[in-house]
Image (cartoon, rainbow, N blue to C red):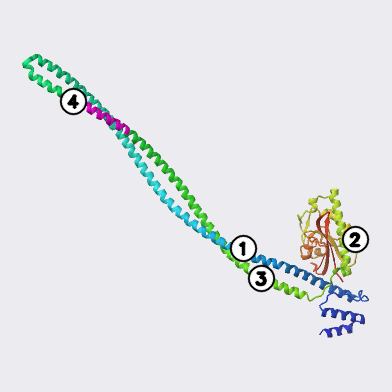
Amino acid sequence: MVNLWLDFLYKITGGGERVLLDQVADRLKGCDLNFVAPSDEQESILARRLTAGFGNLSEAIRQAVALSVQIAEAVPPITAENGELVTQSHAQLGALTEVFTATQRLLEGLRGARDELREVIDLSKEANRCAQEGGSAARELAEAMVEVESRSARAHEIVEVIDTVAFQTNILSINASIEAARAGELGRGFAVVAQEIRQLAARTATAARDVRVIIGETSTAMSSGARSAAETQQVLTGLGELMARAGVAMESVAKRVTGQGEEIVSIDHSLNQVLTLGRNNLENAGRIAERSEALQQATDTLRDCVGLFRLSEDPLRETRHAAAFALATAAAKTVGAALATALRSGAITDTALFAREYQPISGTQPQKYHTAFDRLCDQLLPSIQEPAAVAQPWIVFAICANRDGYVPTHNQRFAQPLTGDPAKDLVGNRTKRIFDDRVGHSVGAHTDPYRLQVYRRDTGEIMFDLSVPIFVGAEHWGGFRIGYALA
């Protein structure tokens, strides 16, 4: 099939082009993309187109090779981290299970404590009731003793009267005996009666004295009992108050224990969810580990496939790549020096120059932004970018981008007045945009000596982008990028 295609090409081309096509066929057959046209054919249209095609393909594959190398280097650490994640997930799941079990035990303990507190509260209430009843009884006893003491005092008064009567009776009996003695034989019977009365008075006086002693001792005992009863009443009243306060405190503790129990229930529910997530994470970690191994195998296969192609060792052997590199390097140094001068002169502050805050410009599509440094760039960059943009007819653009891919000032050919038509403005006005595509995002972020990339621009054409970092003093600001095609 290849021979038929070549025969057809031979018929429609001249001898020189036949030689060129023979060389192309040999290169393609051997997956050799390091194509260089013969010196006598390099300026022909076909040679330029073939050179561009081989160049685009070789750089695309070179990027694929570089990407596969990066992936291959990243996969083993990822695989190791996934293995560690599985181990940690196992340990985490075990720890969570232990915490869950401990929480269950704590919850059971709190429930038991709550029940026991309820029993203690009931006993406290009963003790308080008993103390109140005891206090009432002690108060009644004290009152009774006071009454008995009062009556004892009255009895003492009566005994005093009896004692007085006995004394007077004794006096009377003595007087009677004297009178009976005077009467002689006639008063003998009266003397006997007087004697008996005197003896009765003596016994009455003795009995009165005994009763007085007993009443005194009883009164003393009753006074002491009354004081003891009063003190008992105070103690029981104080005990009742203490039991009441203790009951209130235990009620508060019971409420807190109940609240803590509810919190533990909530924690228990959350732990249960965490355990479920932990099990899911463990399963996911296992699947990730399996996929990491599959990714490792796929990466090895990709490296093997792209390894079929032979690429030039130095992309800068291509004339346009070398020219773009030289232009970008010189322009990056000039831009860095101009921005450093602006810093020293006070035209802008360090904070403003390296700012990464973007203020949307209303009514723009694609979205455009102002920054703290874009107006300064509008003043400084055109005199550096425009000469680079027109240095070669094949250069499409030569611009600066900061580390986020933001282009404060584009070339004049791509800074035409806005029309309001997004399709036209996409091509005609590309300034003050953040280019966040794969290439646009990387051109200002890297600090490699240069980075050569091939990509499809958002306007549709396949282009090369060569970028060189811009340093303001020792600090990385962004990159100078040149876009171009090989044909």
SS of the residue under disc 1: helix
Q: Residues within 10 Å of mark 3 (few under 14, many from 20)?
A: few
SS of the residue under disc 4: helix
Q: Residues within 10 Å of mark 1 (few under 14, many from 20)?
A: some
The quarter holding residue 382 reads bottom right
Q: Is residue 381 visible?
A: no
Residue 291's mark? 3
Would you place residue 150 above or below residue 67 in this image? Answer: above
The residue stretch that appears in magenta? 205-224
- Find disc 1 in the rendering and name its residue: 88
Residue 27 rendering spot, x and y as whole percentages? 84, 78
Disc 4 to disc 3, C-alpha distance: 124 Å
Residue 204's mark? 4
Amino acid type, callout 1 = Gln
What residue is shown at x 8% (from left), y 17% (from top)?
187
- Find disc 2 in the rendering and name its residue: 387
Q: Earlier in the sequence, mark 2 or mark 4?
A: 4
**Secondary structure of the magenta portion, mostly?**
helix
Residue 107 is one of the magenta-drawn residues: no
What residue is shown at x 73% (from left), y 75% (from top)?
301
Closer mark to the observer between disc 2 and disc 4 = 4
Amino acid type, callout 3 = Arg
Would you place residue 48 above or below residue 264 in this image? Answer: below
Disc 3 to disc 2, C-alpha distance: 51 Å
| Quadrant of the drawing holding the C terminus | bottom right
Disc 1 to disc 4, C-alpha distance: 108 Å
What residue is shown at x 68% (from left), y 66% (from top)?
78
Q: Earlier in the sequence, mark 4 or mark 3?
A: 4
Disc 1 to disc 2, C-alpha distance: 59 Å
